[in-house]
């Protein structure tokens, strides 16, 4: 039961989201112009297609839970590959690393305005590399500092991009570095 | 024809201008590095380079991305042959004969055959691209909105039909991309669509955050979940390249011819990219090659066929991109994005309005192929040094390039949130086996499809039969139907075969 639900889950999520958006599209307020198609026609058509495709897939998976569809590319690969190469080795996964990666990236974006580009990037590089199971701290520290400085130099000095300097007291560090690099 | 040659000569001069030539060289080097680096794909590399083109004029921008695309089809072959690590899916067939030849003690010969094949495939495809583009553009000039809608629809369906995995998943991915492109204020009525009162959504969702998020951050998240477990380097690390003699290559002329044809054809059909070309060419060699029974044992034909086809697909892809504005692959979708960012819509008109640019692109493919050959021959030793970079370090820089790249378009932090959202969407797509390419194409070409559909409805008074009564659009609609029916037919046939026979 659980594997079947797991297989159905993405389609059920998409189906529910599409139904909600279709409701939204059906209630768009606009003034019709003659017999011209309105702004709702195109999104409605797309949402109907999503709903129909998901519904067909859900029914197929309920009727044949083990049904695995092969695309043209899969068939071409299977046809060309020697026998020994057809079975793919199972890959070990680390869900906590994924959660950490997403959380760190969200934190990086959220703190960019407060910490400023330099401090935020140094921290992000260091913690993210460590989260990626790399353990040599001197290399991590050098990469984080060097990488953040290089990004700052290239994007602020060469490309003239205005990267966030952050709020006090972090802005002081950004401004000092900018003066040191000759960035105005 | 003389006019074409004359303009092509002008294109060569244009590419040799310092800025354009620098873009070409940088594109070749970066494209090859990206193909060699673990955890970085060719499309991801082209996506990451896109933000650097904002400040450039259009010609060096397109030259840079095209050069990356050309050399990216070769770089992964080196790691396949030497270390049994395919840089790209298209390089997998090279494991079977390329790595086998290297393991048998002749890695220099294997690398030489790959380089010669990439060079030959590239030059053949560049020639065919120049020959086909002008007639294609002439035909396309006669197109009206129904034909454009039919062309886009055919592009969509073939990308969906020729991918891997479930047809339903590919369709959902495509529709999702098309839906994303409708978010924001409608251009004709000025009505908010799916904005939910958010100012960020009122501006619409650009294809750049979608592409960068899904291909860049999404792929890094997938690799992170696997613990950045790149396979350890093993195999023959002695690096040298021995180019085959012309007499040896001449013996394989059938393989070169067949595989070039497969590559160009797979390139022209949207969706059938370098990966399909590479595998189909290997399969064709297995069917029709003189030494078909020896395939997989480390013979030159097994190296030449996939490499010629994957490089030959590049020129094939550029034809519909430049003449119709239809990208047939992830990389060409990014190149189309670069055109649009610079305010140029590829299509038949650019052969008249921007012919210098078009021929500079053509010339850059020729020079790019030659440069790729030189780079592959002389710089292979330093190139493979990047394989020793830890994947965790490479990946964090990829994410930062994604974020800064998206930020630099509007200097707006809200674009970063879009990257994060589409990075998670990209990860979920990978996890649930929804292909990303249809979503990206849907996002880029969705507005084109909507505009051409609405223009047709307005021009032909809501008569939808016009799509089936005009010859070109009717033919394209028939091809579209075929592209959708064919996978269903295959599925049905497979299902029937799987049924137990009656006693």
Image (cartoon, rainbow, N blue to C red):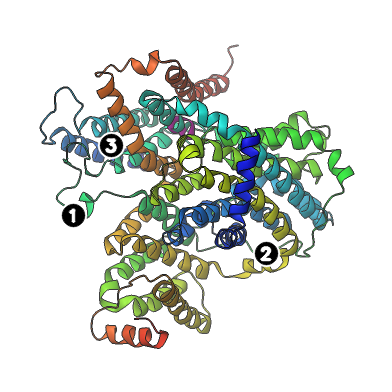
Q: Secondary structure at mark 3?
A: helix
Quarter holding the N terminus of chain B is top right
Examine the rendered structure and indicate whether residue B395 appears above or below residue B481.
below
Q: Which mark is residue A15?
A: 3
Q: Position of residue B207 (x, y in %)?
A: 36, 48
Q: Look at the numbered discs 2 and 3 and tell me whether their residues touch, using CB distance below 8 Å.
A: no
Instruction: List the residue tagged with mark 2.
Output: B233
Q: Determine the chain carrying the residue at label 3.
A: A
**Which badge, 1 or 2, is on the more N-terminal residue?**
1
Examine the rendered structure and indicate whether residue A96 appears above or below residue A181.
above
Q: Determine the chain carrying the residue at label 2.
A: B
Q: Is residue B218 left or right of residue B361?
A: left
Observer-nearest of B398 and A52: B398
- The answer to whether residue B229 is magenta is no
Q: Position of residue A139 (x, y in %)?
A: 53, 81
Quadrant hosting residue A127: bottom left
Give the magenta range: B156-160
Q: Position of residue B371 (x, y in %)?
A: 68, 56
Q: CA distance from mark 1 to mark 2?
A: 49 Å
């Amino acid at each position: 039961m659980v594997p079947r639900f797991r297989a159905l889950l993405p389609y059920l999520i998409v189906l529910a989201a599409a139904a909600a958006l279709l409701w939204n599209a059906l209630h768009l307020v606009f003034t019709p112009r003659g017999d011209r198609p309105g702004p709702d026609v195109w999104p409605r058509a797309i949402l109907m297609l999503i709903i129909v495709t998901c519904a067909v897939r859900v029914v197929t998976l309920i009727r044949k839970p083990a049904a695995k569809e092969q695309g043209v590319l899969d068939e071409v690969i299977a046809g060309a590959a020697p026998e020994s190469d057809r079975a793919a080795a199972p890959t070990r996964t680390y869900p906590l690393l994924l959660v950490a990666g997403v959380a760190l990236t969200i934190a990086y974006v959220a703190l960019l305005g407060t910490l400023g580009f330099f401090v935020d990037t140094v921290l992000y590089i260091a913690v993210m590399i460590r989260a990626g199971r790399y353990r040599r701290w001197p290399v991590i520290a050098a990469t984080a500092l060097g990488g953040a400085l290089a990004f700052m130099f290239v994007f602020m000095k060469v490309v003239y991009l205005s990267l966030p300097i952050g709020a006090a007291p972090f802005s002081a560090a950004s401004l000092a570095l900018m003066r040191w690099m000759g960035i105005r | 024809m003389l006019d074409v040659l004359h303009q092509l000569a002008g294109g060569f001069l244009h590419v040799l201008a310092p800025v354009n030539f620098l873009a070409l060289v940088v594109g070749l080097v970066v494209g090859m590095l990206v193909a060699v680096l673990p955890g970085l794909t060719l499309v991801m590399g082209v996506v990451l380079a896109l933000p650097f083109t904002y400040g450039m004029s259009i010609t060096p921008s397109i030259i840079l991305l095209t050069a990356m695309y050309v050399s990216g089809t070769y770089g992964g072959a080196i790691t396949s042959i030497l270390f049994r690590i395919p840089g790209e899916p298209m390089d997998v067939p090279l494991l079977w004969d390329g790595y086998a030849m290297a393991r048998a003690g002749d890695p220099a010969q294997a690398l030489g055959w790959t380089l010669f094949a990439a060079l030959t495939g590239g030059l053949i495809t560049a020639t065919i691209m120049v020959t086909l583009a002008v007639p294609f553009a002439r035909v396309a000039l006669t197109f009206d909105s129904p034909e454009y809608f039919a062309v886009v629809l055919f592009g969509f369906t073939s990308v969906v039909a020729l991918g891997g995995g479930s047809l339903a998943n590919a369709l959902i991915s495509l529709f999702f991309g098309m839906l994303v492109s409708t978010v924001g204020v409608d251009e004709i009525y000025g009505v908010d669509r799916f904005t939910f009162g958010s100012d960020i959504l009122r501006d619409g969702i650009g294809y750049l955050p979608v592409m960068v998020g899904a291909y860049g951050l999404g792929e890094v998240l997938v690799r992170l979940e696997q613990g950045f477990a790149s396979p350890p380097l093993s195999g023959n690390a002695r690096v040298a390249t021995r180019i085959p003699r012309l007499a040896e290559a001449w013996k394989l002329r059938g393989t070169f011819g067949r595989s070039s044809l497969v590559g160009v054809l797979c390139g022209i059909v949207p969706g059938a990219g370098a990966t399909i070309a590479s595998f189909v060419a290997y399969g064709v060699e297995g069917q029709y090659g003189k030494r078909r029974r020896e395939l997989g044992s480390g013979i030159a034909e097994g190296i030449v066929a996939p490499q010629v086809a994957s490089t030959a697909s590049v020129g094939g892809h550029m034809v519909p991109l430049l003449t119709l504005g239809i990208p047939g692959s992830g990389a060409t979708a990014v190149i189309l994005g670069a055109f649009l960012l610079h305010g140029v819509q590829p299509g038949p008109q650019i052969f008249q309005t921007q012919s210098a640019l078009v021929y500079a692109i053509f010339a850059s493919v020729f020079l790019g192929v030659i440069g790729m050959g030189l780079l592959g021959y002389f710089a292979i030793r330093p190139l493979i040094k990047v394989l020793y970079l830890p994947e965790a370090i490479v990946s964090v820089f990829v994410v930062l390039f994604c974020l800064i790249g998206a930020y630099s378009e509007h200097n707006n932090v809200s674009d970063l949130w879009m990257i994060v959202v589409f990075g998670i969407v990209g990860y979920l797509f990978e996890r649930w086996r929804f292909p990303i390419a249809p979503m990206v194409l849907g996002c880029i070409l969705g507005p084109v499809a909507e505009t051409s559909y609405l223009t047709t409805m307005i021009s032909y008074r809501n008569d939808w039969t016009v799509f089936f009564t005009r010859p070109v659009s009717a033919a394209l609609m028939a091809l579209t139907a075929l592209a959708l029916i064919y996978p269903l037919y295959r599925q049905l046939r497979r299902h029937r075969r799987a049924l137990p026979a009656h006693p």
